[in-house]
Amino acid sequence: MNVVFRADASLPISTGHVMRCLTLADALAARGANCQFISRAHPGNLIEFVRSRGYTVHALSEPPAPADALHPGDEAQPPIHSHWLGATQAQDAEACAPILADIQPDWLILDHYALDARWELALKPHYQRLMVIDDLADRPHECDLLLDQTHSRKAEDYRAWVPSSCALLCGSQYALLRPEFAALRPYSLQRRAEPQLRQLLITMGGVDKDNATTQVLEALRSCPLPVDCRITVVMGATAPWLAEVERLARNMPWSTQVKVGVKDMARLMADSDLAIGAAGATSWERCCLGLPTGMLVLAENQKYAAWLLDQAQAVRMLRLDEELKSELVGFIKDVTNSLEYLKRLGERASTITDGEGCKRSMEWLISIRA
């Protein structure tokens, strides 16, 4: 089976779309599929990283058009995130067409907020079936299978956006997590039976273009963390504020380590007692492992999914504004004064997903092809 993924990473987009596609690609490759990627060479891309994982990546260059010419009048009502593409949908489709025509994939898997049915229909002669990975339910798709891993997402949210024949996989039971998260879930949940606060994990996404990590570390200085608490900060290799965060970490009141390009995130999360983390793809990883989390929304498109997790009391929402310091102090006081609260937060998080979503999604792909 030939599978092609169309997904981008960049400083505005961050890394989550490519990373969850990689998770699905690994699962499909383990079943014998030939997986390839098409990605645009934005600043902050993951093209070489994906290649290092053994996959062919067809890199699309930035078009020569200036930024203000990317939305010509013939593209009526472009997607809200169209500026993330670095081209018009027509330009992107034109660049992808010869690649897909050569491969003729059984499945084209699209994970991009800036593309919709116009792009999909333009390329339809060059693939057998289309799967869309989405989180927004805000634009039309012409696809055979759609996955939205948002907690409490319903199939009805997409009925107006997809053909009646489209199979819909909606809800966090389909979250695309690497297998090590499901494997470490029993260990992680068991060690939280007797909660403690000795290891704090900070993860603001693979890029953190707005330097939220620094704001969190500065706010933590006023928080009543135990004196023996250890802080681990995880950042991506392309994070623009990495050097500043490393300098700040050296002067924190607690032992603070900055890790870059972490390859054992599941183990790191499982061994952590509390996380301060960004909304987005890593939300499902933390939930799978029952890791209690204070969550910050770093992008407009994360708000709805984050709000749903907050309503389920599976996370504690924190505002990334002038109130961050007071909200973080209050959160740390709550978890240090009541380890039972820390335990309940983790228990509710663990009900969101069991980490088997990638396996479920892959079985749908295989069954539809059959």
Image: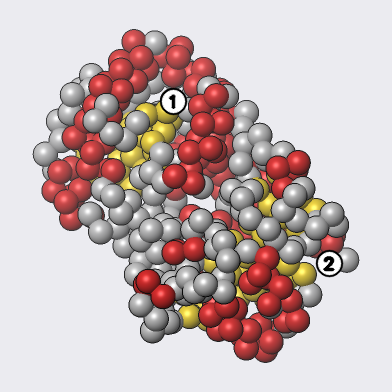
Q: Is residue 255 above or below residue 316?
A: below
Give coordinates of residue 278: x percent, y percent. Answer: 40, 41
Q: Which label number is shown at residue 212?
A: none
Report the side of 14 relative to 210 (left or right).
Answer: right
Q: Nearer the viewer, residue 62 or 265?
A: 62
The residue furthest front is 73
Amino acid at pointer 2: Arg
Q: Is residue 179 visible?
A: no
Query: Quadrant of the image for the N terminus?
Result: bottom right
Q: Is residue 299 above or below residue 130?
A: above
Identify the element where label 2 is drawn. helix
Q: CA distance from mark 2 to mark 1?
A: 41 Å
Identify the element where label 1 is drawn. strand
Q: Earlier in the sequence, mark 2 or mark 1?
A: 1
Q: Residue at x 38, y 58 (%)?
A: 12
Give coordinates of residue 240: x percent, y percent. Answer: 25, 59
Q: Are the residues at dot 2 and dot 1 in contact (C-beta closer than 8 Å)?
A: no
Q: How many marks do you count on the picture? A: 2
Q: Residue at x 36, y 66 (%)?
A: 44
Q: Residue at x 62, y 36 (%)?
A: 151
Give coordinates of residue 64: x percent, y percent. Answer: 38, 84
Report the side of 213 relative to 119 (left or right).
Answer: left
Counting other residues with Cα less than 10 Å from the Cα at mark 1, is it few (<14), some (14-19), or many (20 or more)? many
Q: Residue at x 53, y 37 (%)?
A: 304
- Please give the residue where the numbered disc 1 appears in the rendered image: 316
Q: Is residue 270 above or below residue 364?
A: above
Q: Is residue 338 visible?
A: yes
The residue furthest left is 251
The residue furthest right is 370
Give coordinates of residue 288: x percent, y percent. Answer: 57, 37
Query: Quadrant of the image for the C terminus?
Result: bottom right
- Please give the residue where the numbered disc 2 appears in the rendered image: 369
